[in-house]
Image (cartoon, rainbow, N blue to C red):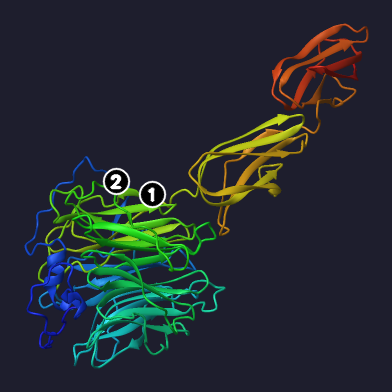
């Protein structure tokens, strides 16, 4: 958080006169880092003069549709996004907004609403100035709850003291307006900074719908604190301490599947470290801090939890950027045991190691299907590190990640002054088949920072390769195969006699268990009894969380016998024509012939190889004399004969 009022004088803590190398404590842990812009400026690409927007390199193409959300000539940056858990088509993104002043910087919070899953957005608005004695706000974080409310958490600046205070704006009309505001925390002798918020969205949790907000308090030292609300943001608890030690910054909370509350942050103990702690009593108390990883010259971590019913339910994923390879890379570590132990660090970006290119500000989301999505800035394709692109990394196993270029144009990193910078984070959320990434983008040139998103399709939970049917011994054999599966509970086989039309429905014929999550090809089969008529089949693929999707429909000429069956013709007697129906239980050569009363063959209606199934053939007796005739069906070693009468 930066100084918002030019007359406010901040007395910095006295630092050691010794020049400290990189692995020594930085001033980032002594006071709000944005009050000393040299920390940010020394870490991230920027230019104080407008950079010329480079031409798009045709060698690097993305299929993602990019959308400008904020559409404003003044700078907007540091965005946050959240999808409603009641209606996933409603999405709110919020950001720092400088439309009311760049020199001097006047921080407001802008926001926009999408009602179609992020494809189109409302005209951006500013949050109302309804906080007593605090006209300016910054560092927005969007939240949701189980009732369909939206929240925008802010650091708001006291007009008199210049200190940061924690306030939350609330919308009870699904993001249309934010006309309620509540204070969460304030200490007259401290500066509150770098807040992040989460909600317990598990309806069966003992702490369901609790709101949590963690942040850094700068006083005589620094500590990570947390407050909670049990009444949808109206009242907030007294702050509780999360971190055991000082020298901390940039916390991020998340909730596990049984109401566990997790917090990660950046700490320092001889080197920068990614830290973690948890509460099992709804944020009342916390345990002992855990080191996830040393992280050389790192920035602030982000976190998400797998809340699916898949094989990785409850896994905790923490992502951050650091310089262990000599330049900034995006990293991930996960825990499968509630944060007690952590995996080896996984490099998310897949460009050559140590190539001098940068990947920074990773943010992670996990869908209810267990799909992991990470957004980050990347300079791998640009002429120099002052031009950035946005990448999306995705995984279904937390071990291997795709890397997909998401931005259609590179962005300069020009800033009009030291106070109006790109910020500290970008974001992403994923729910209900909707994936919404958001980032700051300056492709328009000058100092025109805009908030962008892209249209993202989720990875296919189950990739169905084939779906076929055949008839063997009178039974219908359905066969299908999958190329990959994610959280696949199984397949419900559904049957209909009229393709679900004209008031008819689909009926469950059986169920075949899936393979959960796999990248190997798997073959499936299901045998249905013969029904002797045209039958339609489809697969209902069901995920562990109950989400489902349908396959294409197969039309099958079903049979009801194990060998062959010949029906009585209709009408009988007839003049001049009649229809003959028959069933063949197996593929093979079929003969259907007509004989007169003397046993002489008069016509062969069928004399060919046929697939197993039900058939109907027309016999026209116009050229034959009236009398008694016989028709015979044979296939393999089986045969059957029936009599019919032609009237003249």
**Residue at image point 39% right, 74% down:** 277
Q: Residue 215: percent from the left, percent from the top?
A: 31, 79
Residue at point 43%, 50% (across, down) = 459
Numbered disc 1: secondary structure: loop
The tag earlier along the polypeptide, 2 or 1, is: 2
Q: Residues within 10 Å of mark 2 (few under 14, many from 20)?
A: some
Q: Between tags 2 and 1, which lies in front? A: 1
Image spot of residue 545 (x, y percent): 56, 59
| Residue nearest the viewer, comparing 178 with 409 | 409
Q: Residues within 10 Å of mark 1 (few under 14, many from 20)?
A: some
From the viewer's perspective, is residue 493 above or below residue 195?
above
Identify which residue, 325 or 449, lies in the foreground: 325
Measured along the vertical axis of the image, is residue 172 above or below residue 456?
below
Q: Position of residue 267 (x, y in %)?
A: 27, 73
476 or 215, which is in the foreground?
A: 215
Q: Nearer the viewer, residue 39 or 594?
A: 39
**Picture coordinates of residue 158, whole percent (x, y):** 22, 89
Q: Which residue is mark 1?
A: 400
Report how many numbered discs are placed on residues in the image.
2
Residue 501 seen by the camera:
no
Which residue lies under the disc numbered 2? 62
Q: Quadrant of the C terminus?
A: top right
Asked whether residue 267 is in view, the answer is yes
Left-right relation of 173 to 630: left
Cα separation between marks 2 and 1: 20 Å
Residue 253 sits in which quadrant?
Answer: bottom left
Q: Residue at x 8, y 76 (%)?
A: 18
Question: Is disc 2 in contact with disc 1, using a CB cutoff of under 8 Å?
Answer: no
């Amino acid at each position: 958080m930066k100084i918002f009022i030019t007359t406010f004088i901040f007395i910095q803590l006295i630092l050691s006169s010794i020049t400290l190398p990189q692995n020594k404590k930085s001033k980032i842990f002594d006071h709000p880092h944005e009050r000393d812009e040299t920390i940010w400026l020394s870490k991230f690409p920027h230019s104080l003069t407008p950079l010329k927007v480079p031409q798009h390199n045709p060698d690097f193409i993305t299929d993602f549709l990019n959308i400008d959300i904020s559409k404003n000539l003044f700078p907007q940056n540091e965005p946050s996004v959240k999808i409603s858990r009641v209606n996933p088509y409603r999405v709110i993104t919020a950001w720092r907004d400088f439309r009311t002043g760049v020199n001097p910087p006047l921080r407001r919070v802008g926001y926009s609403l999408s009602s179609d899953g992020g494809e189109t957005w409302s005209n951006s608005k500013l949050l109302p100035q309804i906080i007593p004695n605090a006209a300016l706000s910054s560092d927005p974080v969007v939240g949701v709850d189980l009732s369909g409310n939206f929240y925008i958490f802010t650091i708001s600046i006291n007009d008199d003291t210049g200190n940061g205070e924690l306030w939350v704006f609330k919308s009870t009309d699904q993001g249309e307006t934010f006309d309620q505001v509540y204070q969460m925390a304030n200490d007259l002798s401290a500066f509150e900074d770098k807040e992040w918020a989460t909600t317990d969205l598990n309806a069966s949790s003992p702490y369901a719908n609790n709101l949590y907000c963690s942040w850094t308090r700068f006083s005589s030292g620094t500590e990570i604190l947390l407050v909670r609300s049990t009444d949808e943001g109206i009242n907030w608890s007294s702050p509780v301490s999360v971190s055991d030690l000082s020298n901390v910054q940039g916390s991020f909370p998340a909730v596990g599947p049984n109401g566990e509350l997790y917090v990660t942050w950046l700490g320092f103990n001889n080197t920068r470290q990614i830290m973690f702690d948890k509460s099992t009593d709804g944020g009342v108390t916390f345990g002992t801090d855990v080191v996830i990883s040393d992280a050389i010259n790192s920035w602030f971590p982000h976190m998400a939890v797998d809340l699916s019913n898949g094989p990785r339910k409850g896994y905790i994923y923490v992502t951050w950027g650091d310089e262990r390879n000599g330049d900034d890379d995006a990293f991930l570590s996960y825990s499968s045991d509630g944060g007690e132990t952590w995996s080896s660090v996984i490099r998310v970006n897949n460009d050559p190691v140590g190539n001098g290119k940068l990947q920074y500000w990773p943010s992670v989301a996990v869908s209810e299907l267990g799909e992991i999505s990470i957004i980050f800035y990347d300079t791998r394709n640009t002429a120099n590190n002052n031009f950035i692109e946005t990448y999306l990394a995705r995984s279904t196993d937390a071990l291997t990640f795709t890397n997909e270029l998401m931005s259609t144009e590179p962005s300069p990193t020009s800033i009009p002054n030291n106070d109006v910078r790109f910020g500290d984070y970008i974001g992403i959320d994923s729910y209900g088949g909707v994936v919404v990434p958001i980032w700051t983008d300056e492709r328009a040139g000058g100092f025109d920072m805009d908030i962008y998103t892209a249209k993202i399709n989720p990875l296919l939970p189950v990739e169905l390769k084939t779906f076929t049917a055949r008839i063997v011994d009178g039974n219908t054999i359905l066969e299908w195969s999958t190329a990959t599966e994610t959280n696949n509970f199984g397949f419900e086989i559904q049957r209909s006699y009229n393709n679900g039309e004209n008031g008819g429905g689909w009926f469950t014929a059986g169920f075949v268990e899936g393979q959960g999550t796999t990248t190997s090809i798997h073959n499936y089969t299901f045998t249905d009894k013969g029904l002797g008529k045209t039958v339609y089949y489809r697969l209902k693929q069901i995920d562990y969380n109950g989400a489902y999707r349908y396959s294409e429909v197969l039309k099958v000429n079903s049979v009801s016998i194990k060998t062959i069956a010949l029906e009585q013709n209709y009408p009988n007697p007839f003049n001049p024509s009649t229809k003959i129906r028959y069933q063949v239980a197996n593929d093979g050569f079929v003969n259907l012939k007509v004989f007169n009363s003397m046993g002489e063959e008069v016509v062969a209606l069928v004399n060919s190889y046929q697939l197993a199934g039900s058939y109907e053939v027309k016999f026209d007796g116009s050229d034959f004399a009236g009398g008694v005739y016989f028709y015979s069906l044979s296939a393999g070693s089986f045969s059957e004969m029936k009599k019919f009468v032609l009237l003249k």
